[in-house]
Amino acid sequence: MKDKIIVTKGNDQIDLYLISEGKKLWLFSQKYSMSVYNYFRNGRSVREVMAYKDWQKGPRLNKTIERIPGMIKYVKSEYCEDGAGNKAS
């Protein structure tokens, strides 16, 4: 299964999650931005996000995408034994 980034919308913020091996792992929250929410609302594969070339069209989307690789690495190291989505015992 491909890793996927999804977003949920709260009152004044959005939460980004990584879906990996059927697990929903919280990446980070940030202030609501329509451009970021619209980009991720239907989910995006991690590969697609990392290949995104039009970052400069939206500074908030740019900053969000720049944060994702580091947060994925951190979340997988904390919650996954081998960094590949397998839960630590």
Image: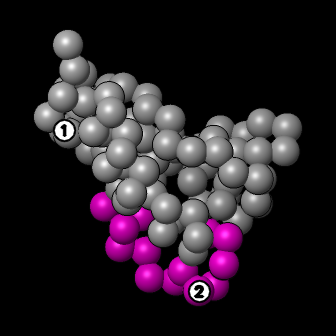
Which of these two is toward me, 20 or 75?
A: 75
State the image coordinates of residue 87 (x, y, percent, origin top left): 24, 22
State the image coordinates of residue 71 (x, y, percent, origin top left): 42, 51
Q: Earlier in the sequence, mark 2 or mark 1?
A: 2
Q: Is residue 48 visible?
A: no
Give the residue at x 35% y 73%: 51
Dot 1: few (<14), some (14–19), or many (≥20) neighbours within 10 Å?
some
State the image coordinates of residue 47 (x, y, percent, origin top left): 31, 61
Question: Is label 2 in contact with label 1 (beta carbons under 8 Å)?
Answer: no
Tell me the amino acid under the disc marked 1: Ala
- Magenta span: helix, strand or loop, mainly? helix
Residue 53 in magenta? yes
Give the residue at x 67% y 70%: 60
User: Which residue is the site of mark 2?
Assistant: 56
Residue 16 in magenta? no
Q: Is residue 66 above or below residue 44?
A: below
**What secondary structure is found at the residue carrying circle 2?**
helix
**What secondary structure is found at the residue carrying circle 1?**
loop
- Measured in 3D between alpha carbons, the distance from the residue under mark 2 to the one under mark 1, in whole angstroms, is 31 Å
Dot 2: few (<14), some (14–19), or many (≥20) neighbours within 10 Å?
few
Q: Is residue 9 visible?
A: yes
> Magenta segment, which residues?
47-61
Q: Which mark is residue 84?
A: 1
State the image coordinates of residue 84 (x, y, percent, origin top left): 18, 38
Tell me the amino acid under the disc marked 2: Gln
Point out the image quarter for the N terminus. top left
Q: Name the colour scheme.
A: one colour
Q: Is residue 20 above or below residue 39?
A: above
Q: Residue furthest bottom?
A: 56
Q: Residue furthest top?
A: 89
Point out the image quarter for the C terminus. top left
